[in-house]
Image (cartoon, grey):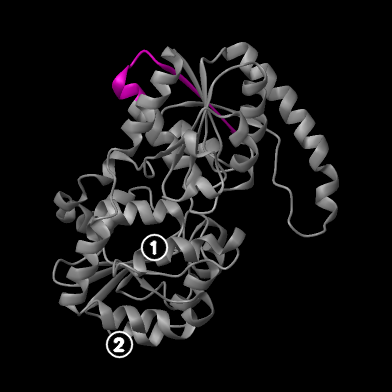
Amino acid sequence: MKVLISGGGTGGHIYPAIAIADALKQIDNTIEILFVGANGRMEMTRVPKAGYDIRGLDISGLQRRITLKNLSFPLKVMKSLRVAGAIISEFKPDVGIGVGGYASGPSMYKLASRGIPLLLQEQNSYPGITNKILARKATHICTAYPGMETFFDQAKLHFTGNPVRKDLLEVKVKRTEALECFGLKENKKTCLLVGGSLGARTLNESMRDATELIKQHPEVQFIWQMGGAYETTYANCNTALLDNVKAMAFIERMDLAYAAADIVIARAGALTISELSIVGVPSILVPSPHVAEDHQTKNAMALVNEEAAVLVKDNEAKGTLVAKMLELVVDEGKLGLLSANVSRFANPDAANTIASLVIDLVKQ
């Protein structure tokens, strides 16, 4: 059995795809898996690190604003369709899995045109344009949120939850290892601030502007992932140089970062929500205002409405975010409530459920 998985661009697309691939290999180690991504995007390095082969397409997104870059978009699509077709002819997959992102469109379209069955995995409460276009050609559409019949054919829907990496399923027993990994102290509260693999400007600016406040609270220590896009800007700022701040561009061992954390500050992407649910860590969510249909706010409110997270608006974060965290991290009752409630959203079997659907699709 051969499976082609395509998509990427952000960790929110890549890591669920890798989790599905891992689940497929666990069910049947003879399954052959090939990824197709977009050249220059993070999947081209993350996927090989996970042990899978990947081929690249020269494809980028259509800009939502008027720009000259859009003039080259049709040419990139045509070239990507041609290259995707060649990859498919060479690999001869039995089934395709689209996880959203630039490369998913051409790859899944060419698979469907050859009668190869498709499964789509949609991570967000508001689907991306690629999955909305491909939905008519898919047999199964796996979602992380209920109520997605607004966008997709209900007969195709499977409410599976978002797949997460296996290493996140056992973080509670890794705290000692985690503290040693990051050079942290056992007797201090730990805040993990992470804006995704690329970083988040508002979260980074909130840390930069809170130097004196953080300095006044040495009893709280920080793991600050600033993101590769912001490393040169913030790596040597005054906050990053404080003794109780461990600043880095990217965290390889997110399982250990979660294991060390008493509280997390993050954006409200679908993957982040799923990971927080699995690890059961209290969080302050700062939804990005720069996403389609404000879907991160919708993601966050699903938790906030159940007292499973705290929300701080992006335009209010710089003046209040760190102070709010310092107030919350010492409130054991509130932390316990948030942890218990967010854990109710967890679906640790999502990857296995999707993998089983993929295998059944080929058998049918």
**Who is closer to the viewer here, 295 or 258?**
295
Specify the quadrant of the image occupied by residue 341: bottom left
- Residue 277 screen position, x and y as percent: 29, 55
Q: Which mark is residue 302?
A: 1
**Who is closer to the viewer here, 257 or 141?**
141
Numbered disc 2: secondary structure: loop
Circles 2 and 1, Cβ within 8 Å, touching? The answer is: no
Disc 2: which residue: 216
Residue type pointed to by label 2: Gln
Q: CA distance from mark 2 to mark 1?
A: 34 Å
What's the residue at 27%, 42% (across, down)? 348
The magenta stretch spans residue 294 = no
Q: Which mark is residue 275?
A: none
Relative to 2, say whether 277 is above or below.
below
Please provide the residue range marked out in magenta. 24-37
What's the residue at 35%, 64% (across, down)? 303
Q: Could you tell whether 131 is left or right of 125 in the image?
A: right
Residue type pointed to by label 1: Ala
Q: Could you tell whether 75 is left or right of 217 in the image?
A: right
Q: Earlier in the sequence, mark 2 or mark 1?
A: 2
- Residue 31 screen position, x and y as percent: 40, 16
Specify the quadrant of the image occupied by residue 143: top left
**Who is closer to the viewer here, 153 or 329?**
153
Relative to 202, say whether 33 is above or below.
above
- Residue 321 screen position, x and y as percent: 41, 79
The magenta stretch spans residue 36 = yes
